[in-house]
Amino acid sequence: MFGLTALELARIQFGFTVSFHIVFPAITIGLASYLAVLEGLWLWKKNPVYRDLYHFWAKIFAVNFAMGVVSGLVMAYQFGTNWSYFSAFAGSVTGPLLAYEVLTAFFLEAGFLGVMLFGWNRVGPGLHFLSTIMVALGTLISATWILASNSWMQTPQGHEIVDGIVVPVDWLAVIFNPSFPYRLAHMTVAAFLATALFVGASAAWHLRRGHDNVRVRTMFSMAMGMLMFVAPLQIAVGDLHGLNTLEHQPAKVAAMEGHWRNGPPGEGVPLVLFGWPDMQAEETLYRVEIPRLGSLILTHSLDGTYPGLAEFAPEDRPNATIVFWSFRVMVGLGLLMLLLGAWAAWRRWRGRLYEGGAFLRFATWMGPAGVIAILAGWFTTEIGRQPWIVYGVMRTADAVSNHSAQVMGTTLAVFVVMYFAVFGIGLRYMLKLVAKGPQPGEHESPPQDPGQAQRPARPLSAGPDHVDPV
């Protein structure tokens, strides 16, 4: 298929399905915590605005949660179908970690999700608030276990290889591997950023259309306040994560920076702003750079150095062209988020937060920026790990199942068609809910009589049966 090998098609298929999936858990993490805050404010201040916002975003959360569960199921099957040699080799580590995620996070979410979505008029306010908190906690626990597994693949620790199989010998070292704290913090903050931008863009869209009311203003104010706090925090966390990556995966950092070789002693390493890393020429072409700034950022010294890609064997190098540009997409969007947060803080100080055509347009267009930045960051870290599936332990080429390129190409085509059809419909429905906007007195119907037919208690049932087109 297009001259691609079975290995390349398997990687594209996994990357495609993960790219769809990762969007939904990120928004789920942020929205669950946002709902907990909204319900806490409602119980504290008894302001109906917070209650109405809770019910509005709970519907969107339910649709997003359902799509996240469906897309996540595919990932588990792919480990067995397309990466069977990896599963046989490292399943004794990744299998239990994923099982712990189900036993803790998924069961916690499943146990309290029904109460959260359908129990507003059926249980007491204290129990309902507890249910919302437990669902939010479940999303964070889920991220913890998933990132523990992924971090172990990036910086494996606490294992031995016996008869060609990974055997865990220290579970604390496996879970709390060197990159785990940084990845967990980076991904969690990214989820909060993406959600703040999503909520803020929704409110800005309504303000631009003249739907200026206290509910829209409240969610816009909360989103911009969150953005002002977490955007600089993410930059700080990202810097620490980069230093950790330089220590454990220097080839990835060299690819991110488009750095091939060091100059004479004392010259330092420039920061390449733009360019085109050429894997064959072993050089970053057309580069625009700032002298010594790369040394200052990564070594905190003007004349410090770090390994260039040319110091690694060609077969051990990641694709610098992709990693270089995906990293710049992530950083560029992060700087735009910082700009939006600072602009919002300035306008709040001037008492003009809810007006201004250019500002509200910027806030609207930044709505998908958090999700795009997450995808760019994921491409950076996963493609930058290549050619290893478990860094320094197992190569990706040794992990793929024995499928032909024709089989992989056919299944990839089926995935593309089905994903765009199914999740395209789900996203369209979710955006229609957003476009409807929060309504005064918005809450679920009172309990039905025992003799009446009951609505099915599934996440998508929390959404309305019909949404008028906008």
Image (tube, helix red, strand yellow):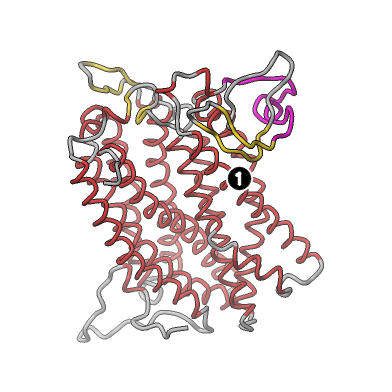
For the point 52% across and 27% down, which residue is it?
A: 281
Which residues lie in the magenta part? 289-307
Residue extending farthest to the right is 350
Could you tell whether 190 is left or right of 415 in the image? right
In the picture, residue 237 is in which quadrant? top right
When the figure is inspected, residue 162 is found, relative to residue 146, above or below; the finding is above
Question: Which residue has dot 1 on it?
Answer: 331
For the point 71% across and 21% down, which residue is it?
A: 268
Residue extending farthest to the top is 265
Could you tell whether 69 is left or right of 280 in the image? left
**Image label count:** 1
Is residue 299 inside the magenta stretch? yes
Q: Secondary structure at mark 1?
A: helix
Q: In front: 65, or 356?
A: 356
Residue 285: x and y, percent? 60, 34
In the picture, residue 284 is in which quadrant? top right
When the figure is inspected, residue 294 is found, relative to residue 410, above or below; the finding is above
Q: In front: 186, or 42?
A: 186
For the point 35% across and 56% down, which residue is it?
A: 109
Residue 438: x and y, percent? 52, 78
Q: In front: 281, or 464?
A: 281
When the figure is inspected, residue 195 is found, relative to residue 330, above or below; the finding is below
Residue 173: x and y, percent? 40, 24
Residue 366: x and y, percent? 60, 62
How many C-alpha atoms fall within 10 Å of the one at disc 1: few (<14), some, or many (≥20)?
A: some
Is residue 129 inside the magenta stretch? no
Could you tell whether 29 is left or right of 261 in the image? left
Q: Amino acid at mark 1?
A: Val
